[in-house]
Image: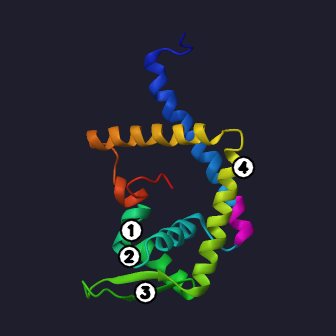
Amino acid sequence: MKSRTAPHAASEVFEAMHDLLHVYKAHMVRTMASVHPELTLNEVRALMFVGRHPGATQKELVAHSGADKAQVARMVAMLQDKGWLESAPNADDKRSRCLSLSEQGKALHQALREARRGVAATLLQDCDSATQSQLLDLLAQVRSSMEAQGTAGCAEGRHGRHGLR
């Protein structure tokens, strides 16, 4: 027995995902402030991306973040000034630079990863591992369907091939 009619169910799925994302972001903002009070959510995203993709270019960071080039350039400069990010010439393209975490940035990245794991564990504490796996599989299925329709936006650039991170 369905409790919802089909035309409403599809939009309600995305509304629920939207609501969950806001709850997650609110928890993350509070948690990130406890890790380092000066960090913005966009800086956290940039540090996490570079930590997962050492040697990524600023252009790749632009694609991942969805921000414009100027915003990313300012943020990269600020993260370098704070001693968390380093850049080196790109051997394949002299016009671009490869980004990596400094030693201080690596320590911060590790603290952020642990904090993010803690938030995720807290928010999913009532879901057993089978339910979490099922949810991940279902989200991957939806994403795959969206990519097949060409509606996933910059899917690989923003969240990696499999990660809604």
Which amino acid lies under the numbered mark 3 shown in the image of this protein? Ser
Q: Nearer the viewer, residue 121 or 79?
A: 121
Asked if residue 82 can be seen in this view, the reply is no
Q: Looking at the image, is mark 4 or mark 2 earlier in the sequence?
A: 2
Which amino acid lies under the numbered mark 4 shown in the image of this protein? Thr
Image location of residue 86, percent across then percent down: 48, 86
Using the numbered discs, state the Cα–Cα distance from disc 2 to disc 1 in whole angstroms. 6 Å
Disc 4 vs disc 2: Cβ atoms closer than 8 Å?
no
Viewed as shown, does residue 31 lie left or right of 17? right
Q: Which residues are magenta?
A: 30-35
Q: Secondary structure at mark 1?
A: helix
- Give the labeled residue for mark 2: 58
Which amino acid lies under the numbered mark 2 shown in the image of this protein? Gln
- Give the labeled residue for mark 3: 87
The dominant secondary structure in magenta is helix
Viewed as shown, does residue 67 lie left or right of 17? left
Q: Which mark is on residue 122?
A: 4
- Give the labeled residue for mark 1: 62
Image location of residue 1, percent across then percent down: 55, 9
